[in-house]
């Protein structure tokens, strides 16, 4: 972080950590409850905003948004 604020690379480092790195191992993307685990974990750091961020992380990590993933798990219903 610089005196002027975070750098773009800092944001990408966090996205990589939560989508592909050690944070992703905690969340276990692609397994049942992954979105809820993400929200629970990230709410510690961004209360009230974790759901939106986890929505984007889910897309990045799995290739689909959580609602699409849930619909597929229900057989398309």
Image (tube, rainbow, N blue to C red):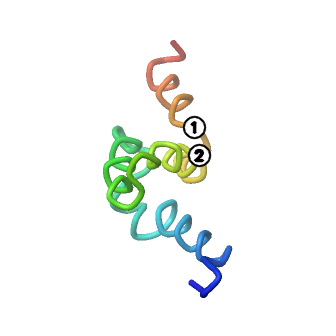
Q: Quadrant of residue 41?
A: bottom left
| Residue marked by disc 2 | 59
Question: Which residue extends farthest top?
Answer: 77
Dot 2 lies on which element?
helix
Q: Residue at x 65, y 82 (%)?
A: 4
Q: Residue at x 38, y 51 (%)?
A: 47
**Total number of numbered labels?**
2
Give how far across and how far down residue 38 sits, in percent. Answer: 39, 50
Observer-nearest of 41 and 3: 3
Q: Is residue 66 left or right of residue 36?
A: right
Specify the label residue 65 is tagged with: 1
Q: Residue at x 52, y 69 (%)?
A: 14
Dot 1 lies on which element?
loop
Identify whether 66 is placed above or below 24.
Answer: above
Question: Which residue extends farthest right?
Answer: 8
- Quadrant of the frame with the N terminus: bottom right
Q: Is residue 68 left or right of residue 37?
A: right
Q: Earlier in the sequence, mark 1 or mark 2?
A: 2
Q: Residue at x 48, y 48 (%)?
A: 54
What crowding class fits label 1: few (fewer than 14 Cα within 10 Å), some (14-19), or many (20 or more)? Answer: some
Give how far across and how far down residue 57 sits, in percent. Answer: 54, 52
Give how far across and how far down residue 35 sits, in percent. Answer: 41, 42
From mark 1 to mark 2, how far is it between C-alphas? 5 Å
Tell me, yes or no, whether the two marked residues, 1 and 2, touch with CB atoms within 8 Å.
Answer: yes
């Amino acid at each position: 972080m610089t005196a002027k604020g975070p750098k773009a690379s800092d944001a990408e480092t966090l996205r990589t950590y939560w989508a592909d790195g050690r944070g992703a191992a905690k969340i276990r993307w692609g397994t049942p409850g992954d979105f809820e685990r993400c929200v629970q974990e990230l709410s510690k750091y961004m209360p009230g905003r974790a759901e939106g961020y986890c929505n984007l992380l889910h897309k990045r990590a799995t290739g689909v948004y959580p609602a699409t993933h849930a619909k597929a798990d229900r057989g398309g219903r």
